[in-house]
Amino acid sequence: MAAAAQFPRCRLLLGVEINPVYAAAAGRNPEVQVEQGDFFSMDWPRVLDRDPGPWLILGNPPWVTNAELGVLGSGNLPAKSNFQGHRGLDAVTGKANFDLSEWMLLQHLSWLEERSGWIAMLVKTSVARKTLRHAWKRQMPTGRAAIFRIDALRSFGASVDACFLVLPVNLGETSRDCDIYPDLSAPAPAGVTGFHDDMLVADVDGYRRFRGLIGHNADYIWRSGVKHDCARIMELSGSVEQGFTNGKGERLHLEEACLYPMLKSSDVARGRIRSDRRMIVTQRRVGADTSLLRITAPKTWAYLVSQAALMDKRSSVIYKNKPRFSIFGVGDYTFAPWKVAISGFYKNPRFVKIGPIDGKPVVFDDTVYFLPCRSEEEADFILLLVQSEPYRRIIEAMSFPDEKRPITAELLKRVSLQQVAERLGLTSEYCRFRDHVETEPRNLELIF
Ligand SMILES: C[S@@+](CC[C@H](N)C(=O)[O-])C[C@H]1O[C@@H](n2cnc3c(N)ncnc32)[C@H](O)[C@@H]1O
């Protein structure tokens, strides 16, 4: 009804609503044709062929994920076969868990690719961003977009980060930028988000200013912590002398061989560098034979066998056809004595220097990213680079603090530490450490 009043020159006003009571109420307005129907089973080409457009696709789609609907036992989902056959959607979501509105927005985009018009939708900000990334990555004919932030808690009682997304398609010049307005009545955008160098960039102006720091990192490679998908068994608290307790509360005694001091993402975010937690590290590189643990660490082997019901049940495909009790995200770098680390989870990026605990290298869970260093001196130098103003500014320009994981290895890998060193006038120091890295003989032979 609001749209009918706002756009009096519209040739055709169509509404679709699944709930028959709502559809009937909205349909009382004679200017509007409201159909009761399911978005996912509508014959949309037939609907859209009724008018050449341009179309304004306006709406407030449901803010739920398929997983939440599954819990509710709802049938409100795209047809399974259809959905799974849609590789484009897979590429966007990458996961079995996706927002219904995201699926709807991708459909809207595909309608307008063949036609023209605007998408104007109230959606979670994360969904708006994913939709834009999808369109920009595929070089769809979209114009300059706008995101108006809204206070979803005040307006809808929903505590999510939400916005009004406006996206023109096949209308005028194409663009890979989106103006960000702080609220619906803001007279001017407060910033611009865009797609540059094949990447979604939070603050395009800041990115342009520090873009010289983008480059290949050949010398220092960001790594992530160990992945084992079984914290209850693999992560222990206690000590060799006193005994350990696993995540099930069971007491046990294990030898030192496979135990490494461990810091979790939350420890790293808080700047904690001590820990009484231990991780069982069964391999020194991905795919290594684990059966020798029977001899080198018999208590640990016996413990893992006793927990095989959980360990062998790890569902991720990465464990299929791999040695028993395999882990991932492990290599020489895991055993580097010094590390400069950051948690992927927190809004304010904080880098920490971490050295050995009780003479052993510290390991992390897989939501921590780190650069391995051979000495404390090298770790100090790397810390100086990543804590520098230019580094902070480029990371800020690239990352979205409201994302669940604002910092990722992909993002960190884009910034060249050599360029940062150069900007800080520290190239010769950089080369000294780098050359040390290259010439140092490898002494991290397999011990198992
Ligand atoms: C967030 S509410 C918005 C309602 C109304 N359009 C507004 O803006 O106030 C989302 C609406 O989408 C409807 N809906 C949910 N799934 C749907 C589907 N598969 N097809 C059509 N409508 C659906 C819900 O019944 C609900 O009324």
Image (cartoon, rainbow, N blue to C red):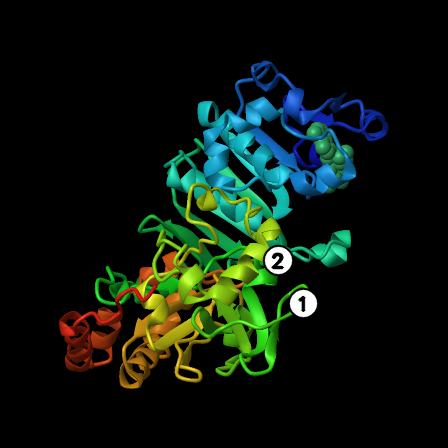
Where in the figure is residue 329, as x and y percent of width and height? 40, 58
Tell me if I can see residue 344 in this picture.
Answer: no
Name the residue located 73 percent from the left edge and 58 percent from the top edge. 153
Position of 354 with respect to 100 (left or right) is: left
* Residue 139 appears in the picture as rendered: yes
Mark 1 vs 2, N-terminal side: 2
Q: Which quarter of the image is occupied by the N terminus?
A: top right
* Direction from residue 354 to residue 131 in the image, left or right: right
Residue under pointer 1: 250
Residue 298 screen position, x and y as percent: 47, 65
Q: From the viewer's perspective, tell me whether residue 197 is left or right of residue 167.
A: left
> Taking the image as four quarters, which one is ligand 1 found in?
top right
Residues 233 and 347: in front is 233
How far separated are the C-alphas under marks 1 and 2?
52 Å
Tell me residue 304's x, y (percent): 54, 58
For this view, does 395 lie left or right of residue 262? left
114 or 220: which is nearer to us?
A: 220
245 relative to 50, above or below: below
Residue type at the position of mark 1: Glu
